[in-house]
Amino acid sequence: MQNNLLFEMLPLVAFFIVYYITKNLYTATAVCIVASWIQLILCKIKYKHISKNTWISTVLITIFGGLTIGFHNKTFVMLKPTVLLWIIGVSLIIGQFMGKNGIKLMLHKEINLPDKIWNKFNFAWGLFFITMGFINLFVAFNFSEYVWVKYKVFGSMGLTLVFMIITVLLAFILQKRYNKQL
C-alpha cells in the first residue's frame, strides 16, 4: 500500500513552514506533533491502514517533541530523526536475516533481480539509514539550529533522493544484465 509522498511529508512540511515563519523550534515542534496525529487519522480514514513507519514516526515525534517542549530543550527533537533512521536501518538489516527483504518488497513488482542482489540493495539501504542517523547527529551538534532545520528538511531528503535514484538506476542496469543471462 503506497501512500502519497506529499501526504507522508505533511508533518515535515508543517514543521518547516512554521519554523521558517516563526524561527521558533518549539512552536514548529508542537505543530509537527499535531500534524503527525492528523496525518495518522487521515491515513486511517483514506487508506484504512496506518503503516508501521507512520506509527513509529508519530510516536517518536510525540515523545521527543513532547520532551523538547516540556523541558524546553531542543536536543530531544534533534535526536528524533537519528532514532527513526536507526530504527529503519536496523530493521532492514535484521529483517533480511529473518528472510524479509524490505527493499525487494517495495520494488520487486517493477524490477526482477536474484535474491542475492536484492539482499545487497537491502543491506546498502540499511547502512545508508544508519549513516544518515550519524550525519544528523553531526549536523545537529556542530552547526546552528537553523542549519540543522534546513539539513533535516532539504539535505536529508536530498541525500535520500540521490541514493534512491542510484539504487533504481543500478537495479535496472543489473536487471538488464540478468535478463540477458536467462
Image: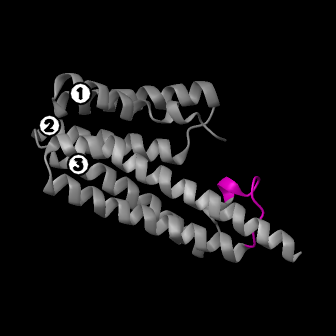
Question: Residue 173 occupies which quadrant of the picture?
Answer: bottom right
Residue placed at 34% from the left, 41% from the top?
A: 153
149 vs 143, left or right, is right
The residue that mark 2 highlights is: 70
Question: Residue 21 occupies which quadrant of the picture?
Answer: top left
| Mark 1 vs mark 3, CA separation in Å | 17 Å
106 vs 61, left or right, is right
Q: Which label is found at residue 20?
A: 1
The stretch in magenta equals 105-114
Q: Residue 180, how many percent across, how many down?
A: 85, 72
Q: Secondary structure at mark 1?
A: helix
Label 3 neighbour load within 10 Å: few <14, some 14-19, many 20+: many
Q: Quadrant of the C terminus?
A: bottom right
The residue that mark 3 highlights is: 78
Asked whether residue 9 is in view, the answer is yes
| Mark 1 vs mark 2, CA separation in Å | 22 Å
Mark in front: 1 vs 2: 1
Looking at the rendered structure, the kind of residue marked 1 is Tyr
Name the chief secondary structure element in magenta. Answer: loop
Q: Residue 109, how many percent across, how many down?
A: 77, 53
Looking at the rendered structure, the kind of residue marked 2 is Gly
Looking at the rendered structure, the kind of residue marked 3 is Met
